[in-house]
Image (cartoon, rainbow, N blue to C red):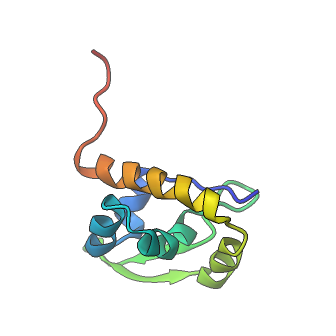
């Protein structure tokens, strides 16, 4: 089973603003492109590492090939669920869920 950890925090560090807008709008092609950045290894760590500069902008990725190979196992049915999960995480960046009452 391919495990993902889809959080607003990871989304904010691993995706650019255009990807954020597309995923919020549930664009499948963008979800397919960004999903490998959220795949976990057997130890629960992200396979793909995101390189950021001092301003927090993305400068590159490490281990992308290994993460993309794992994506080959995703079925269309699973992709549909992932689209919703990614859209929720993206929206939570600017509209975090309210806690408490």
In the image, residue 46 sits, relative to residue 29, either above or below, namely above
Q: Residue at x 57, y 61 (%)?
A: 79
In the image, residue 62 sits, relative to residue 31, either above or below, namely below
Q: Residue at x 53, y 69 (%)?
A: 37
Q: Residue at x 27, y 74 (%)?
A: 18
In the image, residue 58 sits, relative to residue 40, either above or below, namely below
Instruction: Assign the C terminus to one quadrant of the image.
Output: top left
> Is residue 48 found left or right of 99 in the rendered image?
right
Residue 29 placement: quadrant:
bottom left
Instruction: Assign the N terminus to one quadrant of the image.
Output: bottom right
Q: Position of residue 2 (x, y in %)?
A: 71, 60
Q: Residue at x 70, y 72 (%)?
A: 70
Q: Position of residue 97 (x, y in %)?
A: 31, 35
Observer-nearest residue: 35 or 15?
35
Observer-nearest residue: 94 or 60?
94
Q: Position of residue 41 (x, y in %)?
A: 71, 62
Residue 80 placement: quadrant:
bottom right
Q: Position of residue 77 (x, y in %)?
A: 63, 58
In the image, residue 85 sits, relative to residue 18, either above or below, namely above
Looking at the image, the residue that sits furthest to the top is 101
> Is residue 96 found left or right of 7 in the rendered image?
left
């Amino acid at each position: 089973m391919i495990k993902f950890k889809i959080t607003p925090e990871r989304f904010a560090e691993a995706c650019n603003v255009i990807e954020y807008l597309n995923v919020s709008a549930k664009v499948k092609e963008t979800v397919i492109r960004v999903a490998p950045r959220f795949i976990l290894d057997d130890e629960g760590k992200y396979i793909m590492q995101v390189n950021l500069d001092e301003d927090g902008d993305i400068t590159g990725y490490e281990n992308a090939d290994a993460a993309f190979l794992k994506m080959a196992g995703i079925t269309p049915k699973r992709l549909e669920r992932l689209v919703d999960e990614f859209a929720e995480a993206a929206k939570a960046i600017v509209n975090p869920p309210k806690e408490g009452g």
